[in-house]
Amino acid sequence: MKNYLLTPFRPVRSFERVLSNKNYFAISFLYISIPIAGYTAMYIFLTIANGAPSVFTPWLNIPKDQYYSISRFLLAPSMILCWLAATSVMQIIGRLNNGAGKFEQMLSVTALGISISMLAGLLHDLPMSALSALGVIDAREHEIAMNSPTIYRTLLWVSYSIYLIAFLVLFPAAVKTVHKLTWIKSIFAGITGFIIFQVIFFVFNR
């Protein structure tokens, strides 16, 4: 919990604290399980609410009416794939720039960075999906409202702007902590890792 609270304000210090724990690699799976559990719950709630994408067409060849139902099972493996792919790219860039950090170290701090960053999106998505499941709001009408000039779209944009900023700060900080590179090189590696993460996440969860 201390690292969770410290990460948004002093990410490098927080990541150093993570790596100072002898069980840091095992703890990384706890960190990544938080957004996995949150987004899986979101898809369960949307399935209960009979929700469906209303504006966009999923990239995967899945009927819209079944999209959220099937996504319940795709979320966990796709999130792990995003985590592994983004970490691998940042590790490769780090080592090419004479960084000496270990892959397990990158995995651990990246997991915490992902967990914190995705909370911003979950703070919007999870309550809205829960309200849909409870029948307080209509899931399909809310989908339309989020893509129209409404307060719901504003809330969505605010949440995902924080999501974006968090990733663009925490991924470079993770590279800086593990590989001790300059900030310019760390930012390059972190942004590249984020692009890989987001592309894979969109393919499975758009």
Image: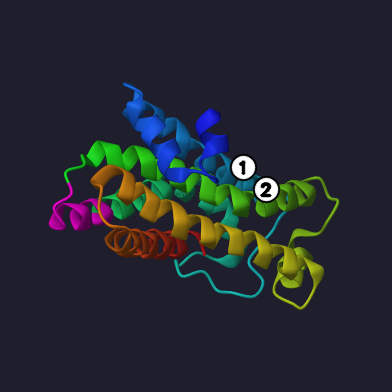
Looking at the image, tell me whether mark 2 or mark 1 is earlier in sequence order. 1
Q: Residue 15, relative to residue 194: is it above or below? A: above
Q: Residue at x 40, y 31 (%)?
A: 17
Between 21 and 64, the one lying in front of the other is 21
Disc 1 crowd rating (10 Å Cα; few below 14, some 14-19, many 20+) is some
Asked whether residue 26 appears in the rendered view, the answer is: yes
Between 84 and 114, the one lying in front of the other is 114
Q: Residue 59, relative to residue 42: is it above or below? A: below
x, y percent for residue 109: 37, 41
x, y percent for residue 53: 63, 67
Q: What stretch is highlighted in magenta?
A: 89-99
Q: Which residue is drawn at 18% across and 49% down?
A: 99
Corner quadrant of residue 1? top right
Compared across the picture, whether 173 is left or right of 73 comes to left
Q: What residue type is labelled 1?
A: Ala
Q: Residue at x 21, y 58 (%)?
A: 93
Using the numbered discs, state the Cα–Cα distance from disc 2 to disc 1 in whole angstroms. 7 Å
x, y percent for residue 41: 61, 42
Compared across the picture, whether 72 is left or right of 105 comes to right
Corner quadrant of residue 183? bottom left
Q: Mark 1 points at which residue?
A: 41
Q: Mark 2 points at which residue?
A: 126
Asked whether residue 76 appears in the rendered view, the answer is: no
Q: Residue 41, relative to residue 1: is it above or below? A: below
Dominant SS of magenta comes to: helix
Q: Name the disc covering residue 144, or none.
A: none
